[in-house]
Image: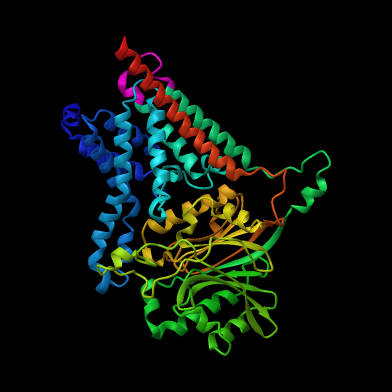
């Protein structure tokens, strides 16, 4: 009976269910075994009667995947429900449906290649991984929930992102997830068991590398001890402030003084037992609903209150907006105590803006669509580069800039000054008590793994944390959704050199080339299938 029901179930429904299942592999759900659903998507695509059918099956899989991955967008439209609430269901459907087009096109290409044999899963992995790369770059890019980030950051498998990056780990994940599906052909057929064995071997190797990477580094031999000592970590006492102020409260001007007082009270409370006095205090993106130009201006009561709150030598990082030359910027500012006053040490303007959140494309603005943030459209800042705040050199990342691999490495190359620490500030209060902030947190941690740098992450309502260079977060160094408080932690940072030396391994190139080699391998397998089919047709 069960078999009959399974056979009668339309392939379109199976495609939708397979996409839904693959999405639940991601944190916070963490059902990692569901990456095997990619094998079902592969089988559905290759058994489609034609290219059009393959497209719709791929699109339906993507629709299910991105509906689960991005449903939290709904919450952002309810912050000002009177103005934007009607857009919420359309926004989720359009976002999920639009992103699903990449999967539909990927499955169309896969079906057109007509791969056969037990190794065709390599072609599937290459095609879908390539389209995921395109999704992360085209139209400003939106690499949310890449298949490679299904693994919880900080775990053993996630450590391979240090070598292969999130896109390389996406190809590997798709290989492991789809290889066992070859057994559906006929598990007793010769060599059909090899793909599953390969998937298990890859999982074992990645886990082994993850276990190998965790131990403390050992000083190098052959006369390089002096260089090693110069690169040793230094301790930096940090405090992350999470006030748990909902987004809708920021539009109530009567609550402004309460917000300021809450931030100051949390910033000045005594350190946690056993923790040193904080040298660096981090507030989240959009901490106060007033321009930095106003409350950091001389004579403003908030500036005076911050000056009194900061101890000599302390530095405050705060996110807000500012204006210059008639343009608005989403800005991170580092403020230091100088005598009885404060001064802005350095600023960073967000480069990668959120479509519809911080600006609306001109052709859509012309038909009346509005952005969610009630300010004039933001202007993108220059490409991300590290800023020196005195205590340490940091690479700022604001909000969803933390989704994009390579920003930190590119900033080091542009400036010639590698960062010692990543500081990611975000305003995930827009997304309420949903899975979105947890997923954002997991993906941000991949940047720490890729770059081998610790990260400080601050949000107003969670998830805030202090992350080590392995992407790990300990419970005492994390504040979840809806929690108010501070994180007091000691971060160990490397004293960065002015520019990478000739003997340093450029892992950015390694991550890029490894992904290209993976795609080339998929391409070679596809070509071999095509050549074999031509040979058969000739004979």
In the image as oriented, which residue stretches furthest toward the right?
223
Magenta highlight range: 182-194
Q: Position of residue 485 (x, y in %)?
A: 51, 69
Q: Which of 352 and 158 is in front in this view?
A: 352
Q: In this view, does 82 lie to the left or right of 288?
A: left
81 sits to left or right of 192: left
Question: Can you give x and y, in whole percent of width and height, for residue 99 in the image?
Answer: 32, 49
Q: Which of 337 and 387 is in front in this view?
A: 387
Would residue 193 be counted in the magenta stretch?
Answer: yes
The quadrant of the image that shows the C terminus is top left
Q: In this view, does 184 lie to the left or right of 146?
A: left
Above/below status of 11 relative to 234: above
Magenta span has 459? no
Seen as rendered, the residue at the extreme bottom is 299
Q: Can residue 486 be seen in this snapshot?
A: yes
- Residue 185, image quadrant: top left
Which residue is drawn at the image coordinates 51% and 33% (left, top)? 517
Q: How many labels does the image show?
A: 0
Residue 261 image position (x, y, % from top left)? 51, 81
Query: Residue 276: which quarter of the image?
Result: bottom right
Question: Which residue in the rendered view is the most extreme toward the front?
Answer: 538
Image quarter of the N terminus = top left
Q: What residue lies at 30% left-to-right and 30% top-to-bottom?
A: 112
């Amino acid at each position: 009976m069960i078999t009959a029901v399974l056979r009668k179930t339309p392939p379109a429904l199976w495609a939708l269910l397979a996409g839904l299942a693959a999405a639940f592999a991601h944190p916070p759900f963490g059902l990692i075994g569901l990456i095997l659903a990619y094998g079902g998507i592969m089988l559905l695509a290759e058994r489609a009667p034609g290219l059009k059918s393959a497209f719709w099956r791929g699109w339906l899989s993507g629709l299910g995947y991105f509906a689960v991955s991005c449903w939290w967008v709904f919450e952002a439209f309810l912050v000002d429900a009177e103005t934007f609430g009607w857009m919420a269901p359309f926004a989720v459907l359009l976002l999920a449906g639009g992103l699903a087009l990449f999967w539909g096109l990927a499955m169309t290409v896969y079906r057109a290649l007509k791969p056969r044999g037990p190794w065709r899963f390599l072609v599937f992995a290459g095609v879908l991984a390539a389209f995921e790369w395109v999704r992360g770059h085209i139209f400003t890019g939106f690499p949310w929930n890449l298949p490679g980030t299904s693994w919880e950051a900080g775990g053993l498998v996630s450590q391979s992102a240090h070598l292969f990056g999130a896109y390389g780990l996406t190809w590997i994940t798709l290989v492991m997830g789809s290889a066992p599906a070859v057994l559906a052909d006929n598990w007793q057929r010769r060599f059909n068991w090899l793909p599953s064995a390969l998937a298990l071997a890859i999982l074992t190797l990645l886990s082994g590398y993850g276990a190998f990477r965790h131990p403390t580094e050992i000083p190098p031999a052959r006369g390089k001890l002096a260089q090693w000592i110069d690169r040793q970590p230094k301790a930096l006492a940090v405090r992350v402030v999470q006030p748990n102020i909902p987004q809708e409260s920021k539009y109530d001007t009567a609550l402004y003084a309460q917000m300021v007082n809450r931030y100051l009270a949390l910033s000045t409370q005594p350190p946690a037992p056993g923790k040193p006095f904080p040298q660096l205090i981090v507030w989240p993106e959009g901490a106060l609903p007033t321009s930095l130009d106003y409350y950091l201006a001389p004579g403003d009561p908030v500036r005076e209150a911050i000056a009194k709150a900061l101890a000599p030598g302390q530095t405050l990082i705060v996110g807000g907006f500012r204006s210059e030359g008639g343009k608005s910027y989403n800005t991170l500012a580092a403020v230091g105590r100088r005598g009885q006053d404060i001064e802005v040490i350095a600023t960073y303007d967000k480069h990668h803006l959120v479509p519809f959140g911080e600006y609306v494309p001109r052709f859509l603005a012309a038909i009346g669509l509005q952005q969610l943030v009630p300010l004039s459209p933001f202007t993108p800042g220059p490409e991300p580069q590290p800023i020196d705040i005195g205590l340490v050199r940091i690479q700022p990342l604001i909000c969803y800039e933390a989704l994009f691999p390579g920003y930190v490495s590119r900033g080091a190359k542009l400036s010639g000054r590698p960062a010692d620490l990543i500081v990611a500030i975000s305003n995930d209060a827009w997304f309420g008590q949903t899975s979105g902030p947890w997923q954002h947190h997991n993906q941000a941690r991949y940047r720490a793994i890729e770059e081998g740098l610790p990260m400080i992450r601050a949000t107003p309502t969670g998830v805030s944390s202090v992350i080590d260079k392995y992407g790990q977060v300990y419970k005492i160094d994390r504040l979840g959704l809806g929690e108010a408080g501070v994180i007091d932690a000691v971060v160990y940072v490397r004293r960065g050199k002015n520019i990478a030396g000739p003997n340093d391994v450029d892992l950015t190139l390694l991550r890029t080339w490894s992904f290209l080699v993976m795609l080339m391998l998929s391409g070679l397998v596809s070509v071999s299938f095509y050549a074999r089919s031509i040979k058969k047709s000739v004979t």
